[in-house]
Image (cartoon, grey):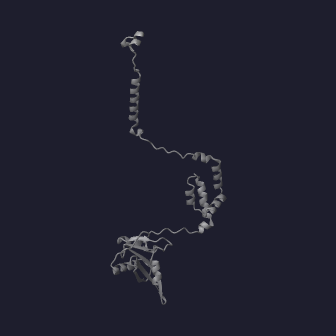
């Protein structure tokens, strides 16, 4: 290196050195100050990620396709809606909305389908399925955990009598008492009589809708009795129904 320096007539102090640009350091400092000032203006929330709602890909294209427009024209026709209704075994409007929720159909289609279902002879005469009973899950292990109640009418000679039947769920003990009428007050008095004779306050009671009117609910809530009404047209969970046949 010394020989090369002598050939080039360079002194040791004249060796080339890397010189940093004077403008680069102030530029970095000024950029840093600008970013810090911008963060102070916007606050710390500007650095947090944001969730942006984006439409599903292809939904705009699907609405413009000829096939989609052709399907809308068919669904606007009442005859085509009736064919669809018959083909799918008198499908209800709720099921139609659930099965076509991803198609983005206009509300006018659903309104026409609703009108068509209201005019359908089969749908207007059919009966909706009964609601599920709320008795499932109850287990009677001790006397008085669950009692089943029902009224029965029996005839003795020429007179008819009303009988209240109370069946215990744990022991299948059947208890009966006669009533002069089906009034709520007399039925509650008969339930008090069952409590006094058996020295037990039932924890839950199962019966039809006649045993869950306002007078009965007041009596149940006063004594802490759980209410387990059977659904309409579902006498199955009430074991007192079979006790009526046994009593007769």
- Would you identify the image quadrant in which residue 196 lies? bottom left
Res 8 visible: no
User: Looking at the image, which is closer to me, 37 or 15?
Assistant: 15
**Residue 179 in the image: above or below residue 232:** below
User: Looking at the image, which is closer to me, 129 or 8?
Assistant: 8
Residue 72 in the image: x percent, y percent?
Answer: 63, 52
Work out which residue is located at the far right of the displayed protein and give it: 79
User: Looking at the image, which is closer to me, 124 or 248?
Assistant: 248
User: Number of labelled discs?
Assistant: 0
Give the left or right position of residue 247, taking residue 112 as reference.
Answer: left
Give the left or right position of residue 108, taking residue 202 as reference.
Answer: right
Res 59 visible: yes
**Residue 83 in the image: above or below residue 185:** above
Work out which residue is located at the far bottom of the displayed protein and give it: 157
- Would you identify the image quadrant in which residue 60 lies? top right
User: Looking at the image, which is closer to me, 219 or 18?
Assistant: 18
The structure residue drawn at horizontal position 45% and vertical position 80%, both measured from the top left corner, is: 243
Residue 35 in the image: x percent, y percent?
Answer: 40, 32
Work out which residue is located at the far front of the displayed protein and give it: 3
The structure residue drawn at horizontal position 40% and vertical position 12%, both measured from the top left corner, is: 3
Picture quarter with the N terminus: top left
**Residue 76 in the image: above or below residue 231:** above
- Would you identify the image quadrant in which residue 177 lies? bottom left
The structure residue drawn at horizontal position 47% and vertical position 78%, both measured from the top left corner, is: 241
Residue 93 in the image: x percent, y percent?
Answer: 57, 60
Residue 228 in the image: x percent, y percent?
Answer: 42, 71
């Amino acid at each position: 290196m010394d020989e090369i320096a002598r050939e080039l007539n360079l002194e040791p102090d004249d060796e080339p050195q890397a010189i940093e640009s004077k403008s680069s350091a102030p530029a970095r400092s000024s950029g840093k100050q600008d970013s810090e000032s911008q963060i102070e203006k916007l606050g710390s929330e500007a650095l947090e990620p944001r969730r942006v709602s984006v439409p599903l890909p292809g939904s705009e294209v699907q609405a413009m396709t000829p096939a989609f427009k052709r399907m809308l024209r068919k669904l606007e026709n009442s005859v085509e809606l009736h064919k669809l209704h018959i083909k799918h075994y008198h499908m209800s409007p709720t099921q139609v909305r659930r099965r076509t929720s991803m198609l983005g159909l206009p509300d006018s289609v659903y309104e026409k389908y609703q009108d068509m279902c209201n005019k359908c002879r089969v749908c207007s005469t059919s009966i909706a399925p009964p609601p599920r009973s709320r008795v499932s899950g109850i287990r009677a292990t001790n006397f008085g955990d669950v009692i089943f109640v029902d009224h029965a009418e029996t005839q003795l000679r020429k007179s008819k009598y009303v009988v209240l039947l109370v069946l215990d769920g744990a022991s299948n003990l059947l208890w009966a008492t006669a009533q002069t009428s089906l009034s709520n007050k007399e039925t509650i008095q008969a339930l008090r009589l069952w409590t006094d004779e058996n020295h037990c306050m039932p924890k839950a009671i199962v019966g039809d809708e006649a045993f869950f009117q306002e007078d009965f609910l007041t009596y149940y809530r006063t004594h802490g009795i759980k209410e387990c009404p059977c659904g309409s047209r579902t006498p199955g969970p009430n074991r007192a129904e079979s006790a009526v046949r046994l009593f007769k």
